[in-house]
Image: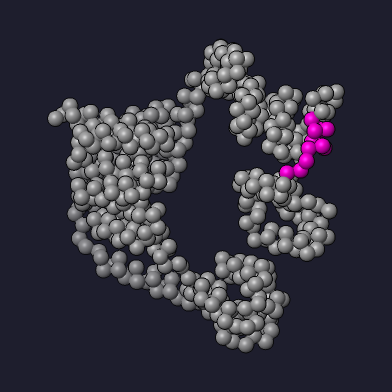
Amino acid sequence: MAESTSTAEQFKQEGNEALKTSDFDKAIECYTKAIEIDPQNAVLYSNRSAAYAKKDDLQNAVDDGQKAIELRPNWARGYSRKGYALFQQGKFEEAKSVYEDGLKVEPDNQSLKDSLADVKARIEPAIDPNNPFSNPQIWAKLAMNPETREYLQQDDFRMKLEMLRRDPSCLGQFMQDPRLMKAISVMLGIDLKSGNQFAEEAEEAAAAERERKEKEEAAKKKAEAEKQAEAEVPVDPAKKEAKEEKELGNAAYKKKEFETALSHYEKAAELDPTDMSFLTNRAAVFFEMGNFDECIKECEKAVEIGRENRAPFAMVAKAFARMGNACVKQEKLEEALKYYDKSLTEDRVKDVERRRKDVEAKIAEKKRKEYINPDLSLEEKEKGNALFQKGDFPGAVKHYTEAIQRNPEDAKLYSNRAACYTKLAEFRLGLADCEKCLELDPTFVKGYLRKANIELALKEQFKAAQTYQKVLELDPGNAEAKQGLLRCEVMPPASAEEVHRRAMQDPEVVGILQDPAMQIILKQAEENPAALMDHMKNPNVAQKIQKLVEVGLLQLR
């Protein structure tokens, strides 16, 4: 049985590694093998649920989350897995119910609390009682009024309402717009005689609101003080003395009197051996002293004591995180990753998540650097050249890719692989390689020529002409660039449908077209082309307009 459990653990670890590298199919396969060996292990179903969710196989993720709950009803992670999958399916009411069940098991689980808040926000959109523009009913009111109904058809008016919904403080910018004053009259059911009158009333209302909040805050502080006074109960003398020793230790620690601090924390631990914080404090001192092995030992003891005495998850998580920090200082990155994972299992803390990502990046960078070998890169390049000459372009790509991994700073390798992608009609991949090549060597003429040829193949004549022009700046007599420019001039323009299709593949273009302000500007340009030149005086707008010109969606006249 012990051997079988060990094998299941091995499959689980392999699944964890695959999940980290986004190989979801392999992760699912490994977790499934582990489950076949140890079918009563809730953690395995929880992990497989995570893998299914990452793969967007949401129903299986729900089923595995449910199985984890059945096996360990008092474990919050199963509820978290099932709730997340339901949330992603858009089943918000069901997800809410699952998160609430999980909080009955672990009322202090912050992850479940955050998830419940998210799903409630989807079910019940937040309305700010102090901002009438945040109430979705305002649109219904405006649509029912004959005059304001027409305003809702106007893009700039809708944009102003959206800005006010997000930030009512920008109302002052729009006070001179009579449409908005009329809309406010309809929304609030009052007669606004002037913008100044409204501003004065708004200021009075704001002052009253500030006063109300100040009174509420004062009442809250008073109530908390009274509650604290009522909660005072007799304290165990030993525990009281232990806390006093801890305070003395804290004071010495701040003064960097580390030996004194260690002595006080040790006395505190002797007086109250059930409190793990004294040990984590000692670990902090060892960390500052650079004694990372002792830091880790103290944290290990702290975790053991914390488990025995049901310490809060956050405290246990803090100890694991400190062990991870110590391992980072020792350059033991794999161990650091292990401790950060344990910390995050106890409590999701953003700073620990960030540190974990940093360590992952360092490990990946370390492996990448260890893999670099210019001699082996040259061998792979020559193999790629030989296959390219034979017309085996997929095989050549494989060897050029290996050559790049062995020597990622060699610009010519990217150019060679771009040539293969061009032969395979994988133009976007080839274009990306050309851009990387030119990033490494901005004077590499062949890289520019390859890039321009790909742009021509994509029927992006405007971009191709610019790239050929760059070649002529570097090599004024380059015949291929001159011929390329001629081809750009005689090539028939792409159809409007083709231009639009290609442009919408660019995320930057999509973002520009979805910008409400740009939508208004472009609509004005249709009616009055001269207005576009006025907008071009704004550098930010000019940059966006130039992007639309480059992709062929807009022409300046």
As drawn, which residue projects farthest toward the right? 477
Image: 370 above or below 160 = above
Q: Is residue 517 visible?
A: yes
**Among the 4 quarters of the image, the one containing residue 18:** top left
Name the dominant secondary structure of the magenta segment.
helix
Estimate the x, y position of residue 254 in percent, counting from the top left: 42, 43
Q: Residue at x 36, y 49 (%)?
A: 58
Image: 198 above or below 548 = below
Which stretch appears magenta? 484-494
Q: Residue at x 32, y 30 (%)?
A: 14
Left or right for 150, reference 33: right
Q: Residue at x 73, y 31 (%)?
A: 452
Q: Residue 368 versus residue 342: which sits nearer the camera? A: 368
**Among the 4 quarters of the image, the one containing residue 374:** top right
As drawn, which residue projects farthest toward the left? 1
Left or right for 395, reference 538: left
Estimate the x, y position of residue 278 in percent, counting from the top left: 29, 43
Estimate the x, y position of residue 151 in percent, counting from the top left: 66, 75
**Among the 4 quarters of the image, the one containing residue 378:** top right
